[in-house]
Image (spheres, grey):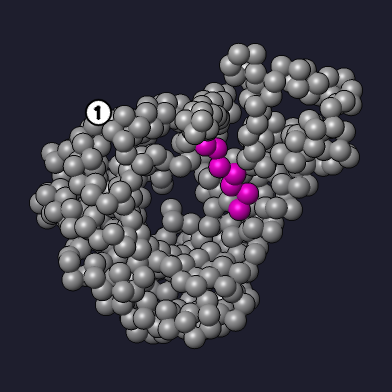
Amino acid sequence: MITSKYNFIFPYQEGTYLAYNSLTNDLAVLEKNEYEEYEHLRKNGETIKSQELIKNLSEGGFIYLDEVNETDIVRMKRYRSRFGEKSLALTIAPTSDCNFKCIYCFEKNVIQPIYMNEEVENNIIQYVKNKILDIKHISICWYGGEPLLGYESIKRISKAVIKICEENHVTYSAGMSTNGYLLSEERVRELTELKVEHYQITIDGGCQVHNKRRGLKNGVGSYDTILKNLKMLTENDEVSISIRMNVDKDNVRDIYDVLEMVESISQNDNVNCYLGHVDAIEGCYGEETCLSNEEYTNLSKDFSELLKEKNLPPIYYEEYPQTLLGGCIATTGNGLLINADGRIYKCWNEIGDESHCVGDINDPEWEEKYRSEYMKFMAYDPMADEECSDCKYLPLCMGGCPYKRINHIERCYYKGNDHVEQMVMKMANTILESEAAEY
């Protein structure tokens, strides 16, 4: 009998202790005598006497009845998730052109005003046909540039893929990352019919701040038009909207303005808001303007409390730790980003930069030509790092962003702070308060 190395145990209230396991994501409250039995096992290898406690702790993954290598368990679950072939996740940019000129855009140095042609559209559809018999679900995220500039391509590809899925009893879902400027009532109706159920739209502050950061190419502000379109979008109860606020040192004080705006337009509880950490990727933005990892983590905690105060939907990953055994789409076998010219990439940070292209959808044999750019992500293994392999936070971050690790930009959002403890404590209070209210 051994204890899991992924256990977090800390004092709770009235002599009790909270136990959380980052591999199973299970949470438990231990009485003092139960905690003491657990500690005797952890420190001295003394077998727990209570059979009920043994049963409960083993079911939660807090202890193992036999010797086991938990790193191998993580590795096995990660491989199963990464290389499972039952889902196909495509991020498609119908154009690499954009009507905005955002100050921190990581694509601005490589972006070209390319629009998808019929050949690329047909080859994407053919790729789906080739995969359809081996999968159970297809998801498409429409991306760019600004995807709505390539609206006709979105419609043609969507109709064809939806038909293929229906004929083969495969489920389908779609979302869109858009600046929101080109939305209209007619387009939202059409996109809803094409199963676009989720929109991510960025607002970076109040009107003046947002317009400075996310204006049109001609210098005209975009805030008023986006706000009008957001209000229209919230009236559609068939869609959900995530409003992202990209934050750095220049606009942290404008968080309140964004939340007040979200509060004012939330009609059907279909709007949530979250923060994006502005990075100086490939030197696209001033490093001195970006928040440090610690600053961003602390800001995220405060932001979560603000959402609660305003009765806005919480950020799920700020409310309770989430295991990330599958990792990023960049490291999954059936996750691809297809640019408007048909070139394929693995990471959002690299789309449009031909030096990082992993294949071409116009080449039917591209999957047989394993380019080094493809293999660098597919061979990425955080457990090859001894420090990560031995870390109890591993199931929660899987080494962090693969792009940053591969490019030697290490970033650990958990180690060295009490973020997990705070989230677990908050969740325990919520559960116990809910149970108490039922009696």
The spot of residue 163 in percent (x, y) is: 43, 83
Q: Residue furthest front?
A: 439
Q: Main secondary structure of the magenta part?
A: loop
Q: Nearer the viewer, residue 188 or 114?
A: 188
- Whether 105 is drawn above or below 141: the answer is above
Q: Residue at x 61, y 53 (%)?
A: 326
- Whether 167 is drawn above or below 351: the answer is below
Q: Nearer the viewer, residue 39 or 115?
A: 39
The spot of residue 35 in percent (x, y) is: 74, 20
Q: Residue at x 42, y 79 (%)?
A: 162
Residue that numbered label 1 is attached to = 253
Q: Is residue 100 left or right of residue 328?
A: left
Residue 226 appears anywhere in the view: no
Q: Quadrant of residue 96?
A: bottom left
Q: Nearer the viewer, residue 236 or 3?
A: 236
Q: Is residue 97 left or right of residue 136?
A: left
Q: Residue at x 16, y 44 (%)?
A: 211
Q: Is residue 370 left or right of residue 360?
A: right
Q: Quadrant of residue 340?
A: bottom left
- Whether 287 is drawn above or below 367: the answer is above
- As shown in the figure, which amino acid type bears the numbered disc 1? Arg
Of helix, strand and loop, which one carries label 1? helix
Q: Quadrant of residue 389?
A: top right
Magenta-highlighted residues: 320-326
The spot of residue 93 in percent (x, y) is: 36, 67
Categorize mark 1 by other alpha carbons within 10 Å: few (<14), some (14-19), many (20+).
Answer: few
Q: Does residue 9 show up magenta in the picture?
A: no
Q: Residue furthest top?
A: 14
The spot of residue 176 in percent (x, y) is: 34, 61
Q: Residue at x 52, y 76 (%)?
A: 170
